[in-house]
Amino acid sequence: MIPLSDPFYRPGLIFHSPFSAYQFIVRPNVKNYGPDGVTQIGELRELVAEFAYHRGEYTYTDSDGNTQVAADIAGHYFDLDAQAEQKGWTDEEKEYVANKLTRACTQFPGEVRLYTKAPAPKPWAKYDETHHSQVATIAETTGFVAEALLYEKENKARKSVIADLEALIEAPVVEDELAAV
């Protein structure tokens, strides 16, 4: 099992499927019965990874002039964090889904793949050599605060640098007062 604290797991774990409304049944609904085989003593809820967002239905007129109803589906991607929150999964259920889908990537590569986005580029060429206490100042001076924050979060994750950059983003813009002549 890959615990949420494992270096492999990261927030934003996203999987891709070439099929637009793909559903991966991670675990079916499981009912547990007592020794008598009749008395239900527990139940594990169904866990389904849905690679689509259903936005309802719409109507259209086909080439024969008939009115048709179709589903509006945005698909192909499964965002683990978003779906876990939406479905109220526990941390254990979320870990279980992450493990099953990670294994599915090697077992069924034509159906499920780990989606990775391109890494954030360095905001300036010598960013990695810049002293941590100077990053926010240079980012503000050059206008690369958002870029520096994204790069810092993805690569170095230094809490003090992230806090300084976030403070710059959240700070209200103060315009210079013009002197009346």
Image (cartoon, grey):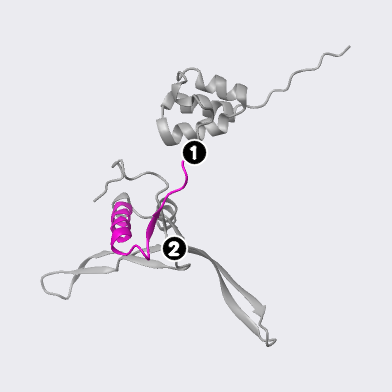
- Magenta region: which residues? 94-120
- Quarter holding the C terminus is top right
Which residue has dot 1 on it? 120
Which residue has dot 2 on it? 51
Give the side of residue 73 with respect to residue 86, left or right.
Answer: right
Rendered location of residue 66, percent (x, y)? 67, 86
Residue 46 in sight in this render: no
Which corner quadrant of the image does residue 138 belong to?
A: top right
Rendered location of residue 48, percent (x, y)? 36, 64
Cα distance in 3D space between marks 2 and 1: 25 Å
Residue 122 in sight in this render: yes
Give the side of residue 123 with respect to residue 103, left or right.
Answer: right
Question: Is residue 99 a member of the stretch shown in magenta?
Answer: yes
- At label 2, the amino acid type is Phe
Q: Residue drawn 44% across and 63% down?
A: 51
Question: Is residue 158 a member of the stretch shown in magenta?
Answer: no
Q: Nearer the viewer, residue 143 or 171?
A: 143
Give the side of residue 146 with respect to residue 152, left or right.
Answer: right
Do the CB atoms of the residues marked 2 and 1 lie less than 8 Å apart? no
Q: Nearer the viewer, mark 2 or mark 1?
A: 1
Q: Residue furthest top?
A: 181
Pointer 2 or 1: first along the chain: 2
